[in-house]
Image (spheres, rainbow, N blue to C red):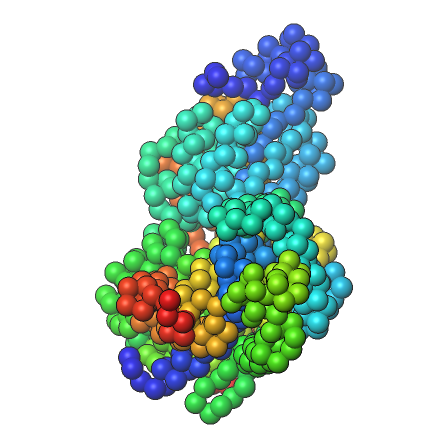
Amino acid sequence: MLSPVILIPAVLNGLLIGAVYALVALGLTLIYGVLHIINFAHGALLTAAMFAAFFVHRLLGLDPYLAAVLLTPLFFVFGYGLQRFIIAPAAHGEDRNILLVTLGLAVIIENGLLYAFRADTRTINLDYAFRVIDLGIVFLAVPRVVAFGVVIVVALILWFVMSRTDTGRAIRAVAKEKLGAELSGIDVAHIYAVTFGLGTACLAIAACLLIPTYYVNPQAGNAFVLIAFTIVVLGGMGSVAGALLGGLFVGVVESLSGLYLGESLGQLGIFVMFILVLLFRPNGLFGERI
Amino acid sequence: MTKVRSGLDRRDFLQTSALGAFAAVTGIVAAPAVLRAQGASVKLGVLHPVSGALSYSGQQGRLGATIAIEEINAAGGIKALGGAKFEPMLGDAQSTPDGGNAEVEKMNAAGVSSIIGGYASSICLAASQTAARYDLPYLVDVGVADSIVTRGLKNTFRFGPGFGVIAKTALDNLVTINDQAGKPAKSVMIVHEDSLFGSGLAKLLNAQLPGRGFEVLETIAHPTPTRDFNNVVLKIKARDPDLVIPADYYNEYVLLARTMQQQRVRPKGIYSVLGGAASSYKFVKEFPEAAQYIMDCNHWFDPRNAKALALKKKVEDKGQFYTYEVFMNYSCVLLLADAIERAASADRAKIIAALESSTFAGHLMPYGPTKFVNGQNQGAAPVNTQVLGNDIQVIFPATFASAKPVFPMPRA
């Protein structure tokens, strides 16, 4: 069963899927790194973004990849508003409250989607969805390769923003020392909201990359977020590079365990890994030691 | 709640004249003319999974049932009940057994005379059991699990064939097709969805295939829905079986076939038993290359039946596909209408009695006259089809085959 004929394609497929996982995790880790909260609404927001991508295609006939250009700024603004006008005021500065508010948001968004669109599983058919790139020994699905490329570009942009721009410096400052940042004149509430917006914008891109080959129903996002949490723990909370590498790694693990344990048990490998990381390296592979 | 209810609710009862009401409730329809003047109706529960993972099949089933109901109503309704019209109560099982149960409860409370549908085996099992508590006649449209009719439920009837018959026919025909081609196929891989339908079939095939000269290399289970078959197809590629036997619902079947095409995996044959998509005009039209040469053993209308062809045209004129859910449900409604006609009553117990003695032959299937033994229609049998060109041809039984099987698949 270890013949390279299936091992190589399985690993490559895993890497390609892992890239999208990484993007979802990137949004999560960004929000965690700065706001120090676990965003329970992440999955519901991803689902909402997938519905948005679906309906932009269905109603406006816009290709999902083009829709990303439209939806990314839209979801940035949405995320910004969510943090600035709902989560922050409702939380009164208490981390515990933020946790509960995001959980509440998740329930509201998910059930809102269920109410509006029912439990139907929807897919879109695009003629390039089943195109392949022939590498001789493997055929790689075009949408997956596109997704991989986009994720790498997004990660690079994010890294550039975080390390080279004033906003990025402000985000890092707030993450490290909130009071100090505030004293140096950084608008902390604004930076919080920008970070939340960036995290949500990542989801919009992920949704547009997923929808050509995946399906959407009101629970669709949850599968990814469970994996994203694993990636964040694996890569280290708040680490961009950790999220990217963790995502790719988890993708490969899932692909291989799916291959050897069967489709129904495919995600088992991920969660076994999750427990092992928590046991032996609780700060993650790239996390700073506390 | 009374155990046996008539098909009339309180309002109908009050509206109907004393004589008419008395006649209907007691089942002695002495004055049909009176009832006709009052416009009585017979409530019929039409239960399908029209949302969720099985929504396409459910909607197709609902389409078939509603067309039949409209036609019966347009032709003057149930004559024995003074031209009473069918009043369908549409239910959505949401692709889960629980959803099916909830709808049966609602339908019972609304006073339906009987229920048809269910589609998936798991939904049919649960819904018919719930209906049995109210002695509510339940006519299964598709659900093939043998256990549906072996529980001794008096209220449950299945018009179509069950697993046992289908699997036996499918295996017999597979052996014949393979023998005729000079036995090119020796090894098999089974890909199945992991609920009642797929797992049951996989178990049966695993037990039966070795005795018929086929080696089962591997059996792969996957959940419904699954949106990625790359791993499954990689495994098929690695084991290189002569035959692939998928047992999946529509979406997964299509995805599997397309992924096989994408990864250039071409076994000698794809032979499915109740393949969710293999004998679907929708699949053939949308993905003709992936569907080409796929063989299936499935429910199929009698191609010599003029009524079946007329319905095909009608459905296609509506811009819909003529899938097996459509003609199975259409036939079930006709069968039920015939029973109510003979019972001359919307009373549940009388409908059950009429179904038990049914000899209805006016349906669209190649089954002959209906005969229920313990709820199972004895004449029900599947047909073998193959996708050839842009059409679906019948390749077995020989009495009405429209083409010869093409096996092994020509290598592209």
Residue B195's place in the image compared with B35, above or below, is below
Instruction: Give the quadrant of residue B281.
Output: bottom right
For residue A90, side relative to residue B381 (left or right): right
Residue found 50% across the figure and 74% down from its top: A240
Residue found 49% across the figure and 84% down from its top: A139
Q: Nearer the viewer, residue B117 or B350?
A: B117
Q: Position of residue B153 (x, y in %)?
A: 37, 32
Q: In the rendered view of the protein, which quadrant contains the C terminus of chain A?
A: bottom left
Q: Position of residue A207 (x, y in %)?
A: 60, 65
Q: Position of residue B135 (x, y in %)?
A: 44, 25
Check the image and name the residue furthest to the bottom.
A136
Residue B62's place in the image compared with B3, above or below, is below
Residue found 40% across the figure and 79% down from its top: A10
Q: In the rendered view of the protein, which quadrant contains the N terminus of chain A?
A: bottom left
Check the image and name the residue furthest to the top.
B18
Q: Nearer the viewer, residue A290 or B135?
A: A290
Q: Nearer the viewer, residue B270 or A23?
A: A23
The answer to whether residue A129 shows anywhere in this view is yes
For residue A72, side relative to residue B56 (left or right): right
Q: Position of residue A256 (x, y in %)?
A: 35, 74
- Image mark count: 0
The answer to whether residue A71 shows anywhere in this view is no
Check the image and name the residue furthest to the right.
A60
Residue B125's place in the image compared with B78, above or below, is below
Instruction: Give the quadrant of residue B286.
Output: bottom right
Check the image and name the residue furthest to the front.
A183
Residue A288's place in the image compared with B169, above or below, is below
